[in-house]
Structures are given as C-alpha cells and as structure tokens.
Image: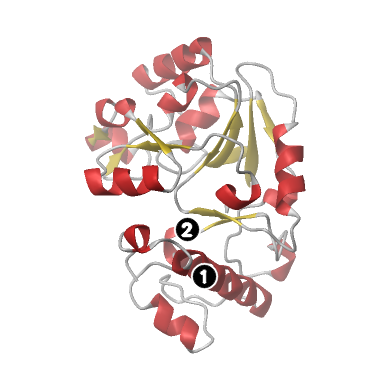
Amino acid sequence: VLKRVDPGRSRTALVYGVSGDARAALRAGGWAVAEAASFKTHRIDGDAANDLGKATAWPGRKLDLWRLPYDKVLYLDADTMLVDHAGTLPKSLAGLWALPLKKGEIGALSNGAGCFNGGMLLLRPAASTFGAYEAALAQNALKKTCEGHDQPLLNHVFDGAWTDLHKKWQLMKVTQSCDRLEHATPDAVHFFAASAPWRGGCRACLAENKACSHRHGLRDAACAQASLLEAQRRWWREVDALPAAARRFVDG
C-alpha cells in the first residue's frame, strides 16, 4: 500500500532473526533492511517478564527506531495494514507527516487508561531520546498500568510527551459494543493476535462469509464483525497482489 500511495518516501524494515530469503524479498519490494540490534540484547525472562504478564518479553524492541537516519519516522507494527478508502490515504498520510513534533515527542494512538498503543508511532529520531529510552530500559522503569511487551516502557519514557493521533488512524479492535468502534473504516487496521487473517483456517472462514477470530467465546457486535470481515478480506487481496517471491512467506 505504501509503495502505491507514497512512492517517493523511503521505507525501512527493522528486523531481527529474519532469514536471508525474507530480507531479499523485502529488498525486492523496495524496502531497505535495518537490523534491530537492541532486540536481542534487551530480552527479559523470569520475574521481570512476569511483571509484564509475559513468560518472555522484549521491552526494548523499538529502541533502534531512535537511531534511524531520518528526521521523522512513521512506525508500523508488522501486523498493521494501511487502508486506502476511495483514494483518501495519500491526503491522510500527508496530514500525519505534517503533525508538528519536537525532539523527544511522539504521536501515538490512545489505548485507554492514560496509555498509548505502540503499534503505530510518529517519532523524530534523536540520540538524546535513545539515551533516555536506554536508561529507562536498564532500570526496568515501567508504567505498569499499560499492557504489552514494550508499551509499559514506552509509556514511561514518553509519559506526558505524546500527542494523540486522529481517530481515523484508530487501530481497530474487535469490540462487543458498536459504540466503542471508533471508525468502521479506519486508515489503519492493527490485527491483534485473535483476529490475524494469516492464522490457520482463516481463509476458509472468509470463504463462508465469516470473520475469523481465535478468541474463545467471542461474541462481538454485528458491526464489529462486519468491519473485521472486510479488513481480513482486504488483507488477503493485498497478499494476493504481491509477487510470488513475497507471497511464499505468508502462511495461508
């Protein structure tokens, strides 16, 4: 999608533990590939990981974003899909890039309870921010009211220094209440684990006109299910449009 709607902008995949074939496919698709060196060095296990509700966690896995050689970076988790509704995405992206940010500030999406989600970040790389992030990581400084592998640390580092992005960028979650579905057609969809369209059997569900979810006992409102169904179908359309060399990395 980015290659189509914003072809003049550099795209970098920050990776760790990715095969040579996968790196080659990324480069063939127009991506520069950068190593996430901090991913390996900042893995935590045991009690520290338990504090995050995980058996193993990588709280510093986004640290290297602040060392990228760009003035401003739009970061997307690999399980996030941008959506171009009727050709409106280029204008939406232009508005996002124009958001004024000082060094040490980020743009992010509210996740409730005073926390932001780390799946989509607008940031300005800086050595000072990298240092503050690394120091907080060394001290295991966490905002424990925020959930996730890296979000407790991110929310501690940028507490009071983040700007809430427009609701049209809301990373869609499957919800039980239609009132909580901020945008049925958001500009970005974050496929959380339960709703990932690449999970086994999902394509068969879509063929039966059913949104697939792996969350036990899911009882979602009809509007949420319809939005999820369309998002999952769109993801597979994007996959089917990829060159064969890239499609083979997708588990259908």
The residue sitting at 56% across, 48% down in the picture is 3
Residues 236 and 21: in front is 21
Q: Report the disc number at residue 192.
A: 2
Residue 70 placed where, x, y %? 55, 22
Q: Amino acid at mark 2?
A: Phe
Q: CA distance from mark 2 to mark 1?
A: 19 Å
Q: Amino acid at mark 1?
A: Arg
The residue sitting at 45% across, 69% down in the picture is 240
Dot placed on the residue nearer the N-terminal end, 2 or 1: 2
| Left or right position of 49 against 182 | left
Residue 54 placed where, x, y %? 32, 45
The residue sitting at 43% across, 36% down in the picture is 150
- Count neighbours of disc 1 (C-alpha within 10 A) and say few if under 14, some if 14 to 19, many if 20 or more: few
On-image quarter of the C terminus: bottom left
Colour setting: secondary structure
**Residue highlighted by disc 1:** 237
Residues 243 and 191: in front is 243
Picture layout, residue 247 above or below residue 162: below
| Left or right position of 135 against 211 | left
Residue 50 placed where, x, y %? 31, 40
